[in-house]
Amino acid sequence: MGGLQKKKYESGSATNYISRNKARKKLCLSLADFRRLCILKGVYPHEPKHKKKVNKGSTAQRTFYLLKDIRFLLHEPIVGKFREYKIFVRKLRKAYGKAEWGGVERLRDNKPAYKLDHIVKERYPTFIDALRDVDDALSMCFLFSTFARTGKCHVQTIQLCRRLSVEWMNYIVTSRSLKKVFLSIKGIYYQAEVLGQTITWLVPYQFAHDHPTDVDYRVMATFTEFYTTLLGFVNFRLYQTLNLLYPPKLDVKGETELKAEFEEDYAMDSESYLEKLSALSASLARVVSSAEEEEAEMDYFPVEGEDMEKMEARVKAQHEQDKQKKLFEGLKFFLNREVPRESLAFILRCFGAQVSWDKSLCIGSTYDAEDETITHHIVDRPNMDKQYMNRYYIQPQWVFDSVNAKMLLPVEDYFLGVTLPPHLSPFVEEKEGDYVPPEKLKLLALQRGERPVEEDEEDDEEEEEEEDDDEEEEEDDDEEAEEEAKLKEMEEKKSQGKALPVKVTPGKVKSENRHRLEQEEKAEEKRLAIMMMKKRDKYLYDKIMFGKKRHVRETNKMVAKRKALDEASKADRKKKKQKKQ
Amino acid sequence: MAAARRHRRVAASQPGFIPLKSDLDGKSLSIGRRKRVNKNKKKNWNKYSDINDVEEFLDDVRLQERATGGLIADKTDESLFFVDTGTKESVLEPASSEETAKKSKPLRIDLILQPTSNVAPPKDILAHQRPNAKKERRIAQKIQKLTDMGVLPRRKRPQKVPVKEKPIISKDPDRTFYDIWSAGSPETADPYYLEQTKKKLVKRPEKMNEKPSLLPAVEVIAPGGSYNPDFLSHQALLLEAHEVEVTKLKAETKLARKLAVNKKEFATQETTFKEQIEGLVEEGEEPENETEGPEAVADADEDEAVGPTAQQEKKTEKQRKREKDERIKELQKKAARQMIDSRQQLFKLRSIETELKKREQKTKMRQIKRKTQQEAQKTLPRRLGKLKFQAPDLDVQLSDELAGSLRTLKPEGSVLKDRFKSLQKRNLIEPRERAKFKRKHKLKYVEKRDFKEIK
């Protein structure tokens, strides 16, 4: 008993938080400056658990910050710069008002400026920390670099964003670390694995901007300001890890190749180098010029606490990765003028292909469309007038789908004028029992190397169609595909015929039996276990099983729907054909 | 100066000295009765000796010197007087000389700035001083020594122009970057010193490095958002968007329904009339009630007055005793009951045990539930300000809007808005409304003259 009576709101959560306005006053900053400072320093508002206590009894909705955070902000040297800037603006306005042009110039020369290097270091003490948070920075930089230079934000910011994003793309190309691509209606999602970190970023389509009004541009510009600094330092470090020069330089071979005659017409001298870099068609110069990158041989010794199986899996995964990195190696692509050049060039170069485009389309084209060694010509129009015999004319989706499938998909589905198969999201990972679209199933089968089986099924369908209507007007490519498929079928039959006489072994039946017995035994054990279960556990078990069954039922329903749809569409097609006839 | 002073003193003592001002005779001063004071104190000498005459005389001397350049008494007669021989005849001259005078006449401002005094300015004393050869030699030696050492005299030193470095601007597109994460040489200086001189920044609070939300920075759109989607996933996305729209519509209709005017509650002629005569007619209609009313009120008043009285009658001794006994008995009964109950619990051990287990399980369940709820909260947008977070509209293309190829694709939604909303969703910034433009003063309508003329 005894002691002084405690006063309300003098300890506990009421003193741990501070409202935004109070914080602003404590720092002597305007609201806009305060907001900018918070974004730069990574101080975010908090929602207290007991709002009423924190708000000293009032229930009004307020924005709260942690008091410790605000106290920390008091030490920030940038705060002083903000105040200086405020004074600078005032002086400048005064000089303008008095028409003192000399004074205006002098003030402009001494404009207070700040840099954010120390904040980057403070927020991300290690390089990996920064790399983990680079998703946001990338998305923002790519977004800002597509903005028109119309005064929605500073032109300098746009230029810097463009430079940094080009640097990043060049790094990804050189390190060949791209993993997934997804063309969505919003933009293009990329995923890469950089130094063990999975990094996802979103790139808007070019020229797809309407500026929404309900977005605070100032806030976005502030975020971008910080993120450009971060991305610059990250880029520098990444270039260092690959022994590349920073700022990036094209290697000597590339530089001589790219000397275009009408370079001056294309871009100003100050911009042409960046443009050449952004063309992505040449490789970058290294600090120590080495003819071929030595591949780091993986050590095949098991790491401590890892058994042989795991190690084997690891080695296998590594092999697969290496294979994926060389997906397009040796292929020569030509981009027609209507396809999105930058994204395609980026992806193709990421997997080792050679790319070129029309000279008038962009700087940095390395060979013409007439080149005989071109293997793939990417076209996005219904037909081409002049076609070469020795190259595939394919639609751009083939590139994206091949990257996601980690293999070169059959080109037949992507020929000119063919209805494309759906572009599936590579970011969806189906669990067991989920509904998997048939296209994905086909793809998985292809990846496993079961190509002929799939083809057979398709052939069957096609054969049915052929039975229904004798005269089918199909395009050349389809016929070719069919022929190929037929040939393969015949080969298979032959091989089967050869194999037949060898395969007569009495032991095989027995082994099957044993297997079956084992299975039966297992099932019996399971049934017994279920019978022995406690009532409570049984209840839970039943519940889980019910859930699973429901899931299966739903997926079955989806499959049935799909089947019905396919059939309906097929019937429609037939009707149309009949009508045509 | 000393000579001049002596000269002055000598002049003043001479009987022929003519003061410039006539009232400076000395005798014109009114002489009152002399006050007697002790003269053995220096203070009194200063206080009571009259030096006015001396001062006035000296002032006069100074005035003469200023005005004429010396004492008038010393001047020759020729310099003071002249013989008036009438006016010279120079009538014609002024007409021609006026122009020349105009040209040669100095400016008035220059005249004002001319020295008015005729006393020559004092000469520089130092100028007459003989240069000290020894000192000069010593200075020269020192300079020679310094120049030999490489230190130039200040005059000959090249002036340091402070070269202003252009500070690195974070927005500069050509700015350079360096390895910020390389391990530099560790600071060996006193940490307190570094902190006080702001060479070392204050340590960042650990809690600030936590991310405010567990959501990923870039959320990939659902598979139905592909530019060339699989049929079913596209349908799934459409369904989702549809459900959002339905809930919105429901809320809207609900609001409309609640705010709709009820036609039954419209005022009719009858109701308006009733309202108008309310309180007027009722008195006349029910006279019986009126008579009853006051009585009832009176009854109520009486009841209130009865109420519980503050002082009840005193209890007798007997009553007290009985009450006390009753109380004790009750307590005893309670204690006995408790004893029995606790003894009985021995036999109920099993059931108690099960009960405890049940309770424990319940708390565990609750704990788990609360944990999962907290986990789920971590990915939700928090309430950070006046406004709640509002999820952006789902970006969806209808089946007939879907483009067959990449060339004909029309992008949906804005990436900028997507990023902005993502920042809000991850609790990095609080949701805000755009500040509305508020007009401070009313607009005034003025008809311009041109406009009037056209009319």
Image (spheres, rainbow, N blue to C red):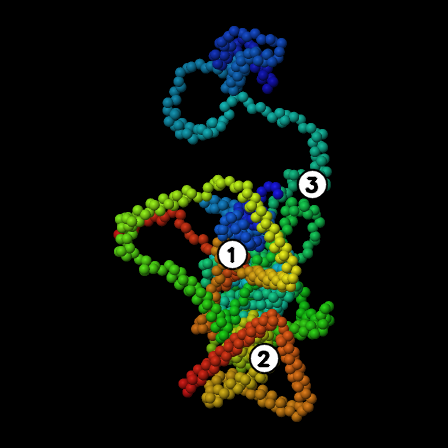
Q: Chain of mark 1?
A: B
A367 to A84, vertically: above or below: below
**Amino acid on which disc 2 is placed:** Ala
- Dividing the picture into quarters, in which one does residue A427 lie? bottom right
At 40% from the left and 62% from the top, the residue drawn is: B254
Amino acid under disc 3: Val
Image: A443 above or below A9? below
How many marks the image carries: the answer is 3
Q: Position of residue A295 (x, y in %)?
A: 68, 70
Q: Are marks 2 and 1 in contact (CB under 8 Å)?
A: no
Query: In the structure shown, which secondary structural element does the residue marked by tag 3 occupy?
Result: loop
Residue at disc 1, secondary structure: loop
**Which quadrant of the figure has residue A288?**
bottom right
Picture quadrant where residue B155 is located: top right
* Residue at figure coordinates x 58%, y 68% from the top left: A191
Mark number, residue A445: 2
> Residue B307, percent across and down?
44, 44
Judge whether B390 appears above or below B455 on screen.
Answer: below
The answer to whether marks 2 and 1 sit on the same chain is no
Is any atom of residue B358 visible in this view?
Answer: yes
Whole-percent x, y for residue A342 in the image: 54, 68
Q: Which residue is mark 3?
A: B151
